[in-house]
Amino acid sequence: MPREENRTSFWRTLWVNAIFAPRTSLGFMRVDFVLGTVFIIPFTQMVFFAFVAGLAGNPGSSVAFVVIGNAVATVTYSSIFSVCQTTDSEKQAGTMEHLLVSPANRFALYFGRGLIPILISLATVTVGLSYAVFLFHAPLAPGALVSLAISVVLTSFAMVGFGLFLAGVALYLRTSIILGNIFLFLGLLLSGTNFPLASLPLPLQWAGNLLPLTWAVTAVRASMAGDPLGTLLPLWGLVSASAVASVAVAVVFWETFERRALATGTIARF
Amino acid sequence: MRHAPHAAYSISRSRALLASLRLAVLSFLADPQWLVPSMIAPVIFGLVAYELFLGSGPWFVIYAILGAGMMSMWGQTLYGSGWATGQDRELGTLEPTLSAPTPYLYVVFGRVAWNTVSGLLGGAIVFVVVAVTYGHPLPIVDPVAFALLFAVVIVSLASVGIVLSAAFVYTRYAGFIQNVGEFAFYVGTGCMFPVVLLPFWTTPFALIFPPTWALDALRYQAIPGYHGLPWGFAWDLLGAVVTTSAYLGAAGAVFRRVEHRVLEIGDLSDY
């Protein structure tokens, strides 16, 4: 056991990781990428799907429905794709071994890395929804701003939590790029972003219900529609539950794979 | 004797091209999982478009297939070719490659050749996935013409990939352009909807890109009653050939200019 004064505090680990990870191990964190993720990708993705929806004329997928869904879905760049790269970046840089033998609190170490992505995710969804309302004229109910803000904040936490979960899985893998790509786009199909989830086959609906994005999109749509608190509370509960579950499973993965890495001495290699 | 150096250069260039192609194939075979990232998005976009177009008539499945197929090829040609330059820079091999007697263009050609083939493979996978989901025979009137025009689309995409590869030697923003500009390119070329749906002022910008012409020609051929660019199929096809040739011609000039410039400045190894 290290002496008390030599132990790194929980808060210091959290803060140091929050500050350093965007410069070292997180993906998509250069200033140009961040600005592109916040301002350009939501716009171009929404325009693309708005035109496709407009051409299709499917009554279940109006342009307003599609642009709100995509405004929320673009959060996956900053939350999932960026965050899930943190573990294999460490492997690639050869720093994973040092990390595994450090006494730092694991929750602080990993969750700290998600703090800046949470802020970027907040900005991304906010800008995306602003485009939806002001450029695509998606309806926003009067007095819905507070509930919408709550939904957006919960969405950012839940999606970054899911990114950390994937980073936990990536600890075992050679690269997280495959995982990142899968979940970057899978949400567009399984989360009701572009069409109601009910139009998918039942097994795919079940899979979709396991994604935080599904509940995040539903909560944001309900908030914008001005749904009552009775409708919103269960949705917020589900978004929060998906965030907590993601981080909890991530912690279990980190502990399991760390033990395995220390036992075999091979997992931490790139 | 005067022709000897030229013959030697010619052998050097063809050897460099073949070596680059061989290395691209071997790298792909050593790590074929890289087909997955460039396949996931197009397959998912294809299925999303299919769901959106559901009930809009049998011809709309063609939109889903063409759009997603083009995305796949775009992913392979641009990511594969452009990213290779970025990797050269990151690994420190760009400087020696560019200072070799063989022009860098031939190295890029080798990569683009393989990426075009693997892009075709990706396009075929997208085609199969969407067609199987559709569950009915695809309403393709003339499969041979469809396949030929599809090849024209691929070549038009590859020409854009080559020019961008040259530009990527110049810039450290290749990743930014590829990732952030991806949807803008899909919108600008009308890859899943007729480009005439875009505001009129965007048309000149859309027409700069060869795939805009090639895709419009392909839709004219494949979709009866299609309303695309007002000049119709023949001019679309001519436009595709002219713009693709212009891109391929420009690629050589751009590469020469870029090579001279970067050798003058000497900062290629900076990453």
Image: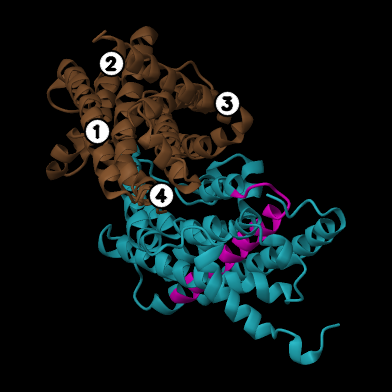
Q: Quadrant of residue A114?
A: bottom right
Seen in the picture, residue B60 relative to A187 is either above or below; the reply is above
The magenta stretch spans residue A170: yes
Query: Do labels 1 and 4 touch, CB within 8 Å?
Result: no
Query: Do labels 3 and 4 touch, CB within 8 Å?
Result: no
Q: Amino acid at mark 2?
A: Gln
Query: Do labels 2 and 1 touch, CB within 8 Å?
Result: no
Q: CA distance from mark 2 to mark 1?
A: 38 Å
- Compare marks 2 and 3 and give the one earlier in the sequence: 3
Q: Are marks 2 and 3 on the same chain?
A: yes
What is the magenta segment's predominant secondary structure?
A: helix
Q: Secondary structure at mark 2?
A: helix
Q: Secondary structure at mark 3?
A: helix
Q: Is residue B242 left or right of residue B26?
A: left
- Nearer to us of marks 2 and 1 is 1
**Measured from the top left, where is residue A2 in percent x and y?**
82, 84
What span is colored magenta in the figure?
Answer: A149-176
Seen in the picture, residue B166 relative to A89 is either above or below; the reply is above
The disc label shown at residue B221, or none: 2
Q: Amino acid at mark 1?
A: Arg
The disc label shown at residue B26, or none: 3
Q: Give chain B's shade.
A: brown
Q: Quadrant of the N terminus of chain A?
A: bottom right
Q: Residues within 10 Å of mark 2 (few under 14, many from 20)?
A: many
Q: Quadrant of residue A171?
A: bottom right
Q: CA distance from mark 1 to mark 3?
A: 28 Å
Q: Chain of mark 4?
A: B
What residue would you read off at disc 4?
B269
The disc label shown at residue A58, or none: none
Q: Is residue B199 left or right of residue A250?
A: left
Chain whose colour in the figure is cyan: A
